Image: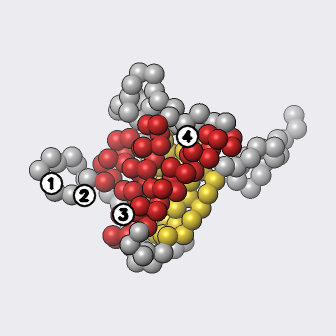
Amino acid sequence: MEPVPVNEDGTAPDEQTIQITVALEGDGTDIAHARHLAAQFLTRVQAEHGLPVSQRAVDLTQLVVSELVTNARKYAPGPVLLDLRIAGDLVEVAVWDSEPVLPIARAADAGRVGQHGLEIVMAVAQGFEAQREPVGKRITVRIALLDDPGGHIAGRDPV
C-alpha cells in the first residue's frame, strides 16, 4: 500500500487550506475588529468556497473570538494572534498570546459578576484545547459550521 502524501499542515496536496491569521496590536479596537474579521472570513468561506455556514456558526464564532481576544488583552502583555481555519465541517478559532499560564474554567456561579467567558466558550464549542507554546499559550476552539438537527446549541449532545 502506497503512503498518501500530505502537506505540512496535514492536508492532502489537492486540498486547499482555508485560513486567515492576523496580529492584533492592542489599540483598543481589537475585539470589535476581530469579531468583524471572523464574520468576514465565514462569509468568504460561503461565497468563494461554497461551504455551508449557518448564522448560528457565524454568531458563535464571533462570540468565541470576542471572549478569547478579550481574555488575551486582559491577561497577557503584548500582541495577540488570531487564526481562523476551516477543518472539515468545523471552524477552528485559535488565539495566541504571550502569557504562559493556561486558563482554568471556574465552576458555574450565577452570583459571580464577570469571569464567565471561558464557561461560555466551552458551552458552545465542539472542542476546546489550551496548550503552552515555546512563548505564551494558544487556545483553540472548534465550532460546527452547520446547525445540529437536534437543536443543540454547540452542534453536539450536551455532556
- Mark 4–mark 1 CB contact (< 8 Å): no
Which colour style is shown?
secondary structure
Of labels 2 and 3, the one closer to you: 3
CA gap, disc 4 and disc 3: 22 Å
Q: Secondary structure at mark 4?
A: strand
Q: What amino acid type should be assigned to the residue bearing mark 4? A: Leu
CA gap, disc 2 and disc 3: 11 Å
Q: Which mark is residue 64?
A: none
* Comes first in the chain, label 1 or label 3: 3
- Mark 2–mark 1 CB contact (< 8 Å): yes
Instruction: Say which of 156 and 106 sits in front.
Output: 156
Instruction: Say which of 21 and 59 sits in front.
Output: 59
Q: Secondary structure at mark 2?
A: loop
Of labels 1 and 3, the one closer to you: 3
Q: Secondary structure at mark 3?
A: helix
Q: Residues within 10 Å of mark 4 (few under 14, many from 20)?
A: some
- Mark 1–mark 3 CB contact (< 8 Å): no
Residue displayed at 35% across by 63% down: 71
Query: Where the N terminus falls, by quadrant?
Result: top right
Residue matched to label 3: 70
* Comes first in the chain, label 4 or label 3: 3
Q: Position of residue 107 (x, y in %)?
A: 22, 49
Residue 130 left/right relative to 87: left
Q: What amino acid type should be assigned to the residue bearing mark 1? A: Arg
* Comes first in the chain, label 2 or label 3: 3
